[in-house]
Amino acid sequence: MSTSDSFGKLNIESKDIKTASGVDLSEHQRTVIGSVLDLFAGRPSLAKLQLWKDDAEFTDPLTIAKGRKQYEAQWYGLQTAFSEIERLGHEVKSNGNPIEMDLDTRYVVKGLGMEKKISSKIEIWMEGDKIVKVADKWDGSLPEGSIAQAFRRLNAMTVPNIVGVPKNAEEDAKRGNQ
């Protein structure tokens, strides 16, 4: 799979995809899952984000990011917010739509040194060969209620104004993204 030169070469770093017994993945599913694992590890790139539809959505307990401007900023924001991101383990549980995966990650907040371990249930929704939604459910759930929803939407609108997203592959490479 290739992308245009303006986005750079698709370089998936997470190639060792762990699956539950009986779960077989296509080559494209492996590429998509590897790219999502890279994103959760704070290793975004414009090429990886070309696997997403422009109107795709990313949700977690902190945000409801809809559209390329919002979800790209969320992924690039991990590099801004955390000094360390360590994947402790993962396992793909289902190859359906959504693809379901368990993910355990350790984060260290920049400047504070505060460490947080998060166990997530990840759902990756596809439309054709593109990602249309990724849901990151900490401890298997997302917050409910109007105040939580308002905060999550505010986060999605604010982060793009704070976090810069590279405009092309050259800017991406200067930041150390591949």
Image: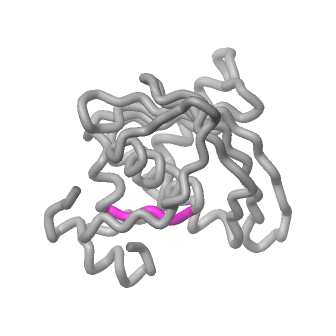
Q: In the picture shown, does residue 53 fall above or below 117?
A: above
Q: In the picture shown, does residue 84 fall above or below 129?
A: below
Q: What residue is rendered at 26% in x and 37% in y? A: 129
From the viewer's side, name the closer residue of 141 and 33.
33
Residue at far bottom of view? 174
The quadrant of the rendering that contains the C terminus is bottom left
Residue at far right of view? 114
Q: What residue is rendered at 35% in x and 57% in y? A: 48
From the viewer's side, name the closer residue of 85 and 171.
85
The answer to whether 39 appears left or right of 111 in the picture is left
From the viewer's side, name the closer residue of 81 and 3.
3
* Span shown in magenta: 42-46
Residue 108, image x and y in percent? 77, 65
**Snapshot quadrant of residue 21:** top right
Residue at far top of view? 145
Residue 120, image x and y in percent? 69, 38
The answer to whether residue 39 of the structure is visible from this angle is yes
Residue 124, image x and y in percent? 47, 33
The answer to whether residue 153 of the structure is visible from this angle is no
The answer to whether 75 appears left or right of 90 in the picture is left
Question: Is 9 within the magenta?
Answer: no
Q: What residue is rendered at 30% in x and 47% in y? A: 51
Q: What residue is rendered at 57% in x and 67% in y? A: 79
Q: In the picture shown, does residue 174 fall above or below 139?
A: below
